[in-house]
């Protein structure tokens, strides 16, 4: 599947038609992480427009952000990973976050980065 949304829509049908098919999700990015960081940057940009300009604080806060366990988008994403046999993760940082913070089984994750040498 090209992203977890697609897995949500079609995995049930694929599993019913081909129960032995290997289910692979290409995460592209961790959507809940990206959306949370975008929201922080937007909030900080709004504050900067009002005169509270601290670009370094914005950068620090957005890169330190991780979704809370109750985040609805995160829960959907994690459920998709649990239903799948393998998930392609685009960065070692996301790979480690999924294992360390959200307890995804390491054997279900594979770092498939175009930008980072994983050797």
Image (cartoon, rainbow, N blue to C red):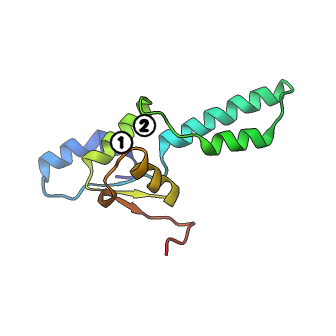
Instruction: Give the crowd class for mark 2: few <14, some 14-19, many >=20 residues within 10 Å.
Output: some
Image height of 78 relative to 117, above or below = above
The residue that appears at 53% across and 40% down in the rendered structure is: 66
**Where is residue 106 drawn, in percent x and y?**
34, 58
Please tell me how many numbered marks the rendered image carries.
2
Q: Residues within 10 Å of mark 1 (few under 14, many from 20)?
A: many
CB contact under 8 Å: marks 2 and 1: yes
Q: Is residue 60 visible?
A: yes
Answer with left or right where residue 29 lies relative to residue 52.
Answer: left
Residue at mark 1:
78
Residue 60's place in the image compared with 20, above or below, is: above
State the residue at coordinates (52%, 42%): 33
- Asked which secondary structure carries label 1, the reply is helix
Residue 91 in view, yes or no? no
The x, y position of residue 16, in whole percent, is 13, 46
The quarter holding residue 111 reads bottom left
Q: Which residue is mark 2?
A: 74
Nearest the eye: 44 or 15: 44
């Amino acid at each position: 599947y090209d992203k977890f949304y697609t897995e949500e829509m079609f995995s049930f049908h694929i599993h019913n038609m081909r129960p032995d098919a290997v289910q692979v999700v290409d995460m592209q990015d961790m959507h809940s992480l990206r959306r949370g960081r975008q929201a922080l940057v937007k909030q900080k940009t709004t504050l900067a427009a009002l005169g509270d300009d601290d670009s370094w604080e914005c950068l620090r806060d957005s890169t330190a952000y991780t979704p809370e366990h109750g985040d609805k988008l995160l829960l959907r994403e994690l459920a998709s990973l649990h239903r799948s046999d393998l998930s392609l993760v685009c960065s070692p940082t996301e790979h480690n976050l999924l294992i360390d913070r959200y307890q995804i089984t390491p054997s279900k994750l594979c770092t498939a980065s175009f930008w980072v040498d994983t050797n």
